[in-house]
C-alpha cells in the first residue's frame, strides 16, 4: 500500500496546492471525510470549512490547512482532487475582512426566509467566514 496519494486542491483561479498527502480531511455535507492512500472511489460535495492535510514535502511530513468554500472532492485509489470556489491558507486571510463578511451575511440572512436558496447561500458565506476566522485565530499547525 502506498504511503501517500497525489493531492490537488483546485480553485477557479488555479491550483491552490499540489503535492503528495498521507491524509486529507475535508468538510463534506455529511461531516468530516478523511482520505488515505488507496481509498475506494468516492465523490462528495463539500461545505465551507477547514481542510487539513498531512503532506510530504522533501523528507519530512507537515500539516497544511486551508479555509475552503463549497465544492467537491473526488477520491480515487491513485489520486485525490478537490474542486472548491476558494481556498486560503491562514497567511492570506484578512481577519477583519472575514469578520465583516460574516456580519454582513448574517444581516442579509435576517431579512430572508429560512429553507430558501438565498438563505442557504448566505449561510455558506457565514460558514466560509467562520472557517477563515477559525484558521487565523488558531494559527497554522505543523505536524
Image (cartoon, helix red, strand yellow):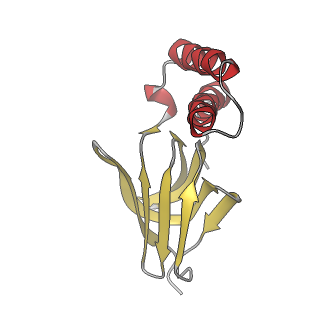
Is residue 119 found left or right of 91 in the rendered image? Answer: right
Residue located 48% across and 25% down the image: 93
Q: Quadrant of the N terminus?
A: bottom right
Residue 102 visible here? yes
Which quadrant holds residue 31?
A: bottom right
Residue 58 visible here? no
Residue lying furthest left: 14
Is residue 59 found left or right of 104 in the rendered image? Answer: left
Measured as percent of width and height from the top left, residue 109 is found at 65, 23
Residue located 63% across and 33% down the image: 119
Question: In this view of the protein, which residue sits in the foreground, 140 or 114?
Answer: 114
Q: Is residue 33 above or below residue 39?
A: above
Question: In this view of the protein, which residue sits in the foreground, 39 or 2?
Answer: 39
Measured as percent of width and height from the top left, residue 45 is found at 55, 59
Residue located 48% across and 82% down the image: 77
Measured as percent of width and height from the top left, residue 94 is found at 49, 18
Amino acid at each position: 500500500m502506498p504511503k501517500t496519494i497525489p493531492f490537488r486542491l483546485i480553485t477557479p483561479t488555479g491550483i491552490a496546492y499540489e503535492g503528495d498527502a498521507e491524509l486529507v480531511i475535508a468538510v463534506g455535507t455529511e461531516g468530516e471525510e478523511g482520505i488515505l492512500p488507496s481509498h475506494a472511489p468516492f465523490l462528495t460535495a463539500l461545505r465551507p470549512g477547514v481542510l487539513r492535510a498531512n503532506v510530504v514535502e522533501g523528507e519530512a511530513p507537515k500539516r497544511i490547512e486551508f479555509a475552503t468554500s463549497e465544492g467537491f472532492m473526488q477520491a480515487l485509489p491513485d489520486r485525490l482532487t478537490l474542486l472548491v470556489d476558494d481556498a486560503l491558507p491562514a497567511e492570506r486571510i484578512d481577519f477583519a475582512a472575514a469578520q465583516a463578511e460574516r456580519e454582513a451575511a448574517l444581516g442579509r440572512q435576517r431579512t430572508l426566509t429560512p429553507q430558501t436558496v438565498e438563505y442557504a447561500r448566505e449561510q455558506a458565506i457565514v460558514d466560509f467566514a467562520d472557517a477563515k476566522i477559525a484558521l487565523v485565530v488558531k494559527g497554522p499547525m505543523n505536524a
